[in-house]
Image: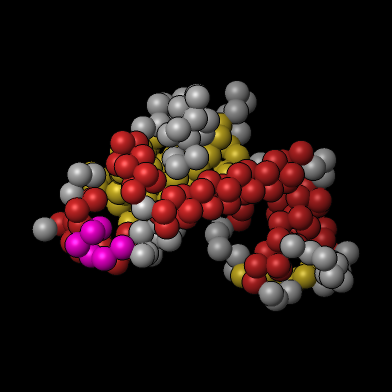
Amino acid sequence: MKKIKYLSKIKSNQLFSHLTDNELLEIINHCSIKEYSKGGIIHLQKQPCNSLGIVLDGDVAIQRLDNDGRVLTIVYLKMGESFGGNLIFADQVSYPMTVSANSNSVILHIDKDTILELCQKDKTFLVEYIRSISNKAILVSNKLNTVVMKSIREKIIYYLNQEYAAQQSQRIILPFIKKDWAESLGIPRPSLSRELSKMKADNLIDYSKNWILIKWKIPDDTC
């Protein structure tokens, strides 16, 4: 059965990590698993959201396209991460952004009724579901903080400080190429490259293709 081979990947998501294989199979037998080619659209902006998506293979980009054609990448999701959970019970149940496959991807779609039933029957699932929604709210808040900053340098420094807190190292390993990083900051790629060069000349950073070394003093309260 095709769905059996994905059990361990589904259980890598905290919503389902406490369930046995049989319990999980009973749930996903009522769900759908779909494959998407790189660049394929999973959900269009303003499309109704009626399911929770779990990334089983590949990675997914959640992006917003403005009226001038500029792309703002909110987040990249990897295997085991979810999307749509903060929308399916909202008053306005439509995607405010486009969800697309950043590489060949496999997605588990769990419908709203199944999620509601799990929340009613399984306290652990309910707690993890609320935690997931809360984390998504923090992520969006952090992204807004980045977007509203006036200068490109401010956006870069804010991002690097966040990554320092996560990686606990002043040598930041970049999880994406510069094009994707520029989109996540909401700026053109050439502008990002120019500012990185200026910051290197100012002895604030050093960098290579896959990493950036922070040379300024990190605040003790960086979080």
Q: Position of residue 17 (x, y in %)?
A: 37, 64
Across and down, in percent, residue 201 comes to 85, 65
Screen quadrant of the N terminus: bottom left
Q: Give the residue at x 39% y 46%.
A: 119
Residue shown at 24% from the left, 50% from the top:
27
Work out whether residue 32 or residue 14 is closer to the camera in this orientation and state it: 14
| Apparent side of residue 79 relative to residue 91 in the rendered image (left or right) | left
Q: How many marks?
A: 0
State yes or no: residue 21 in magenta: yes
Residue 185 lies in the magenta stretch:
no
Find residue 53 and report its horizontal and vertical position in percent. 37, 45
Task: Give the magenta-colored segment's residue range.
Answer: 19-24
Q: Is residue 170 above or below residue 106?
A: below
Image position of 30 (left or right of 84): left
* Residue sitting farthest toward the left: 1
Tell me where residue 216 sits by quadrant.
bottom right
Residue at (36% x, 40% y) in the render? 116
| Image spot of residue 214 (x, y percent) | 77, 70
Q: Is residue 162 something one can see in this rendering? A: yes
Rendered view: 81 above or below 188: below
Q: In terms of depth relative to the viewer, which is nearer, 109 or 63?
A: 109
Asked whether 21 or 56 is in front, the reply is 21
Q: Is residue 80 in view from this perspective?
A: no
- Quarter containing the C terminus: bottom right
Q: Principal SS element in the magenta part?
A: helix
Q: Quick check: 199 left or right of 143?
A: right
Q: Is residue 222 above or below residue 62?
A: below
- Where residue 199 sits, quadrant-wise, is bottom right
